[in-house]
Image (cartoon, helix red, strand yellow):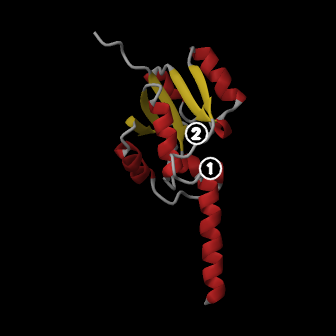
């Protein structure tokens, strides 16, 4: 009988889905089955003071289509810890975050529940550039600004 694979939980916005997200899911999948909590449109608007580009239903569809993801859902909570109810239901073995996704609050949350917190560095897939949503948004804004200057 094969031992059960570990459950690995990740959480995020995944609005401008890019190769960095896929590499993140691939890294998490090396540790077990990946379950993704996605921030709701309402929560992201509140946290980031802007609307998402892609609505939560579309973001959920895209994340679920990635081969490294076993399952995904829209988190029901609000704030930076919008995933509490879902994690308590899932009972993951591992909470996987990028170094910029680490917080003392997440560390305490994991300790309280006996969840291993794994903090990973951002590593792009071989041959691809490093990607982040922040950098993509900046690049798009510059391109839009340059285009408006030419008009």
Quadrant showing the N terminus: top left
Which residue carries the number 2 mark? Answer: 78
Please identify the quarter of the rendering in which residue 51 is found. bottom right
* Residue 150 versus residue 95 in the image, above or below: below
Quadrant showing the C terminus: bottom right
Left or right: residue 135 versus residue 94 is right
Q: Which mark is residue 46?
A: 1
Residue 75 visible at all? no
Report the residue at 50% width, 53% height from top: 18
Left or right: residue 63 versus residue 39 is left
Total numbered labels: 2
Report the residue at 58% width, 42% height from top: 123
Picture coordinates of residue 119 (x, y %)?
Answer: 62, 30
Residue 92 visible at all? yes
Secondary element type, mark 2: loop
In terms of depth relative to the viewer, which is nearer, 28 or 37? 28
Q: Residue furthest front?
A: 127
Q: Residue furthest bottom?
A: 151
């Amino acid at each position: 009988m094969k031992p059960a694979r570990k459950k690995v939980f990740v959480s995020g916005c995944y609005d401008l889905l890019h190769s960095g997200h896929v590499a993140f899911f691939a890294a998490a999948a090396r540790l077990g089955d990946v379950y993704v909590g996605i921030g709701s449109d309402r929560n992201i608007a509140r946290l980031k003071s802007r609307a998402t580009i892609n609505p939560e239903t579309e973001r959920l569809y895209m994340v679920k289509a990635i081969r490294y993801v076993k399952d995904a859902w829209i988190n029901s909570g609000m704030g930076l810890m919008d995933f509490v109810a879902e994690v308590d239901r899932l009972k993951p073995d591992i909470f996987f975050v990028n170094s910029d996704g680490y917080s003392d609050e997440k560390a305490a949350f994991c300790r309280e529940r006996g969840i291993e917190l794994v903090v990973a560095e951002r590593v792009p897939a071989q041959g691809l550039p490093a990607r982040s949503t922040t950098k993509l948004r900046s690049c798009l804004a510059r391109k839009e600004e340059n285009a408006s200057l030419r008009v």
